[in-house]
Image (cartoon, rainbow, N blue to C red):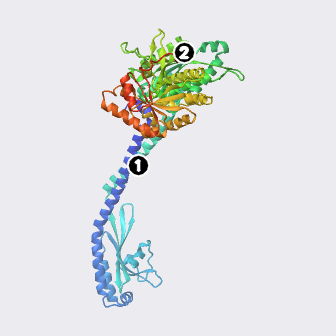
């Protein structure tokens, strides 16, 4: 484990130290238990003989008193009996058995000597008061069983063993034997040394942990000061240098952001104002990103770098954050004095796939290239780095689409939808087209694959809605459909546009909303609620490309769909493929029951038209009747 790793992750070392301390604590507990177990074993061995001798002695005394009705009185008044019992107690004394005596308790409950087997110089006299030092002495009268009383001393265990002598189920006398058990000094010393060693080690580790925590806090404080830009309070380049090896670039998109014409701000208003602008820009970026997910760095001068966390297969959320940064800065008034405010713009370069680069620096270079392109195209732009596409399979790049929107090269072609009953125009569908700089017409199949899941997709939907709104205003008798994707249905800005259109007379009732059939319609939170809201505003709802993928008939009834457009890939095969015919037939039957009208797409021949007419499909769309054109006929 490297020093850098330990310093960056002090919790690992603290946890390791705590684990050692806990292990030693368990060992200490085990040692104490071992000591007690060892003492118990010593006690069991040492007391086994004493218990046996005491039992025999009590049986002898009991047999001597077998004809007596008052044990205490008979012993006091019968010298011969007294001497025999005294002799019996005397022979019990050994090196370890210090005292053997017979006690009784008088009518007041006071313990008194009856016979003492000790030598004459230590002997207690008859009726001498005996002071008990443990409540266990009283247990013998209730339990009527022998009692062992331990009194641990420094080098030995002092033990009193009490045996009841019972007459008519009452404890009349107590045979008490005091003896001691010597501790085995060597073992005791070893155990004590182990205990003290463990306690000392635990104490040292605790001191180490406390010192390490203090040092870590100091280190983090110092590092934080080293890693944070003092002016803007975001990370600085030192942070990147220290952390770049620990950042998994596949979890982020990499953004390079530069303040436009910052030198002019400094030259015009002074460096103090420039510093104020830098602080406000940094605060704005910090406000727009997600705490604990995204990383913001002041890379130098007026340039910032952001790592915005993303899902590896879907950049939508990350790009939403990026767009929020961009638009917030565009809309914000930046304060330069108590009364003056100025507008500030930024140029942004984006590397959507930094994880594909070998190093962080390589990944940053690609974002920097995109930033350079944004500046060259007039600043106040977002440019996304993308490699050249395969020339044999041309697709537009994200930047191509964004440029087309900004340069008003987005347009719509219009194709009629025919009422099968009279073969007359019912309404039109608006079909997205982009006019390339060389005049070529680019169709959606070359556009949507590269912008799916990005904010560019949302922006192009807004542009198409704006075009269709203009056409409806110019042609009050035309009915027109526009395509939306499931993400548009949950986007607040697009919903706001549609709500505003609905406030105008004769717009919502002539604008049909075609939503591509997919599982996303069901899965997106609020999509059903929003679709019902749009329907209540007067819009007609179409499910486009129905039957091509995920089909949920129940959902169609829940959102009160007005039209189903059967996917053209099925309609094209309806003549020769029985399965396609049965699929179309089942969709039509369901639609009739649910009171939903059906549109057949890709009706390209008279034979197909006749087949769908047999199935009583209400509407047709295809080259048989009309090719998409720049304007209405």
Classify 10 Å Cα crowding around label 2: few (below 14), some (14-19), many (20 and above).
few
Q: Depth check: 608 or 527 in front? A: 608
User: What is the x, y in percent for residue 612?
Assistant: 39, 29
User: What is the x, y in percent for residue 73?
Assistant: 39, 89
- For the residues labelled 1 and 2, say whether their Cβ atoms are less than 8 Å apart: no
Horizontally, residue 532 falls left or right of residue 271, namely: left
Q: Examine the rendered structure and indicate whether residue 96 appears above or below residue 67.
A: above
Residue 408 marker? 2
**Residue 505 visible (yes or no):** yes
Q: Depth check: 216 or 181 in front? A: 216
The quadrant in which the N terminus is found is: top left
Q: Depth check: 67 or 608 in front? A: 608
* Residue furthest to the front: 422
**Residue at the (33%, 31%) spot, across then down:** 580
Classify 10 Å Cα crowding around label 1: few (below 14), some (14-19), many (20 and above).
some
- How many discs appear? 2
Residue 199 marker? 1
- Dot 1 falls on a residue whose secondary structure is helix
Q: CA distance from mark 1 to mark 2?
A: 80 Å
User: What is the x, y in percent for residue 91?
Assistant: 29, 77
Residue 629 marker? none
* Residue furthest to the right: 339
First in residue order: circle 1 vs circle 2:
1
Q: Depth check: 423 or 63 in front? A: 423
């Amino acid at each position: 484990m490297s020093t850098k790793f330990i310093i960056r992750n002090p919790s690992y070392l603290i946890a390791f130290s705590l684990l050692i301390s806990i292990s030693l604590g368990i060992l200490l507990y085990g040692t104490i238990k071992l000591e007690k177990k060892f003492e118990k074993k010593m006690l069991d061995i040492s007391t086994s003989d004493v218990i046996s001798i005491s039992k025999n002695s009590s049986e002898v005394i009991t047999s001597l008193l077998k004809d007596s009705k008052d044990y205490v009185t008979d012993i006091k008044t019968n010298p011969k009996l007294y001497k025999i019992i005294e002799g019996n107690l005397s022979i019990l004394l050994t090196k370890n058995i210090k005292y053997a005596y017979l006690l009784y308790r008088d009518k007041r409950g006071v313990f008194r000597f009856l016979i003492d087997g000790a030598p004459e110089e230590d002997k207690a006299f008859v009726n001498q008061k005996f002071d008990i030092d443990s409540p266990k002495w009283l247990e013998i009268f209730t339990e009527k069983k022998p009692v062992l009383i331990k009194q641990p001393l420094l080098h030995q265990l002092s033990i009193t063993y009490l045996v009841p002598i019972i007459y008519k189920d009452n404890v009349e006398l107590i045979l008490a034997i005091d003896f001691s058990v010597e501790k085995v000094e060597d073992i005791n010393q070893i155990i004590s040394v182990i205990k003290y060693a463990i306690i000392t080690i635990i104490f040292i580790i605790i001191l180490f942990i406390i010192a390490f925590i203090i040092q870590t806090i100091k280190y983090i404080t110092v590092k934080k000061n080293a890693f944070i830009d003092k002016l803007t309070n975001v990370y600085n380049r030192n942070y990147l240098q220290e952390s770049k090896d620990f950042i998994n670039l596949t979890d982020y998109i990499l953004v390079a952001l530069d303040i436009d014409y910052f030198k002019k701000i400094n030259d015009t208003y002074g460096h103090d104002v420039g510093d104020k602008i830098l602080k406000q820009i940094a605060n704005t970026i910090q406000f727009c990103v997600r705490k604990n997910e995204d990383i913001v760095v002041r890379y130098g001068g007026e340039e910032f770098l952001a790592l915005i966390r993303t899902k590896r297969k879907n950049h939508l959320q990350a790009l939403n954050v990026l767009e929020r940064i961009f638009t917030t800065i565009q809309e914000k008034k930046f304060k330069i004095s108590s009364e003056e405010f100025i507008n500030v713009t930024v140029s942004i370069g984006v590397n959507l796939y930094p994880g594909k680069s070998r190093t962080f620096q390589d990944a940053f270079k690609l974002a920097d290239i995109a930033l350079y392109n944004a500046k060259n195209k007039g600043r106040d732009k977002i440019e996304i780095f993308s490699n050249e596409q395969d020339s044999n399979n041309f697709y537009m790049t994200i930047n191509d689409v964004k440029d087309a929107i900004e340069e008003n090269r987005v347009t719509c072609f219009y194709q009629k939808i025919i009422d099968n009953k009279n073969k007359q125009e019912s309404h039109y569908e608006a079909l997205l087209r982009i006019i390339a700089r060389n005049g070529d017409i680019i169709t959606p199949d070359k556009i949507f694959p590269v912008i799916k899941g990005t904010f560019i997709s949302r922006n192009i939907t807004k542009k198409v809605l704006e075009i269709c709104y203009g056409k409806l205003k110019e042609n009050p008798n035309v009915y027109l459909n526009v395509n939306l994707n499931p993400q548009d249905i949950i986007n607040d800005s697009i919903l706001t546009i549609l709500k505003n259109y609905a406030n105008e007379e004769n717009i919502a009732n002539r604008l049909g909303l075609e939503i591509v059939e997919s599982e996303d319609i069901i899965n997106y939170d609020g999509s059903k609620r929003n679709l019902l809201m749009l329907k209540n505003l007067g819009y007609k709802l179409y499910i486009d490309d129905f039957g091509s993928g995920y089909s949920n008939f129940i959902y169609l009834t829940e959102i009160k769909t007005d039209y189903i457009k059967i996917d053209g890939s099925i309609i094209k095969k309806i003549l020769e493929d029985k399965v396609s015919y049965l699929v179309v037939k089942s969709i039509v039957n369901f639609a009739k029951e649910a009171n939903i009208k059906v549109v057949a797409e890709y009706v390209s021949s008279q034979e197909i038209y006749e087949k769908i007419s047999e199935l009583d499909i209400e509407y047709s769309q295809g080259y048989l009747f009309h090719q998409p054109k720049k304007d209405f006929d």
